[in-house]
Amino acid sequence: MADINLTSNSRRQLTLFVEPTDALTIERVRQRFNPQQFELIKAHVTLCREDELKDLEKVIANLFLLIETQRSIHIEFSKVKRFENGKGVFLLATGENKEFKELRKQVLNSLYANPGNHEPHITLMHPRNSTCNDEIFSEIEKLILPAKLEFKRISLIEQENGGQWRVVREFEFISPA
């Protein structure tokens, strides 16, 4: 089992990384307009934030049960949107996202009565370390970005002292039939 001891300067999350072949255009945008975030973490959808992983042993037990039956999930995305007073840019998921919500519910089973409505998205420009303007946004809007992505695994990731995120453990879904 993964080492679940955290230092005071550590953060953990459960993440769905975009498959490298699907991430080419997304990563080019991130590298060009948000190189700092690009260096910290690959393109992803956050499944569970650190505050939801307080009982990591139970979460990991849930993950082991889940991967015995879970097949890959798909998320559809809308066009790019700005957020945080226009400083940030993301691809926001569209539709009801039933697969994503069910996945969160299973991962957080018996930890939260209602795991909350976390909307899946892929951040292209994080407002913490980049600033979008109308010219940049117009350029990004013209790109053809993936409208639907398949996610094949859940990654437990960790960040120490604000540095680069690293994968602690991966939980691979079973292969499609």
Image (cartoon, rainbow, N blue to C red):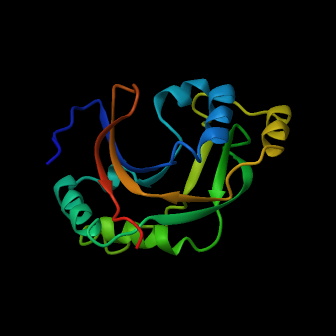
Q: Residue at x 47, y 29 (%)?
A: 40
Q: What's the residue at 23%, 65% (across, down)?
A: 62
Please state the horizontal and vertical placement of residue 108, each as a whole percent of the image: 30, 66
Is residue 56 visible to us here?
Answer: yes
Q: Judge left or right: residue 4 versus residue 37.
A: left
Quarter location, residue 57: bottom left
Which part of the image, by quadrant, shows the C terminus? bottom left
Q: Is residue 4 left or right of residue 164?
A: left
Residue at left 85%, top 40%?
138
Residue 115 seen: no
Residue 172 placement (x, y as % from top left):
33, 56
Q: Position of residue 133 (x, y in %)?
A: 80, 33
The one nearer the camera, 39 or 58, is 39
Residue 66 is left or right of residue 114, and the answer is left
Seen in the picture, residue 10 relative to 4 is either above or below; the reply is above
The picture quadrant where one finds residue 85 is top right
Count the labels in the image. Answer: 0
Tell me the quarter of the picture where residue 163 sits.
top left
The answer to whether 113 is drawn above or below residue 61 in the figure is below
Q: Is residue 167 left or right of residue 60?
A: right
User: Which residue is found at the position 20% from the left and 56% from the top?
Assistant: 55
Residue 46 picture location, percent across and down: 46, 51
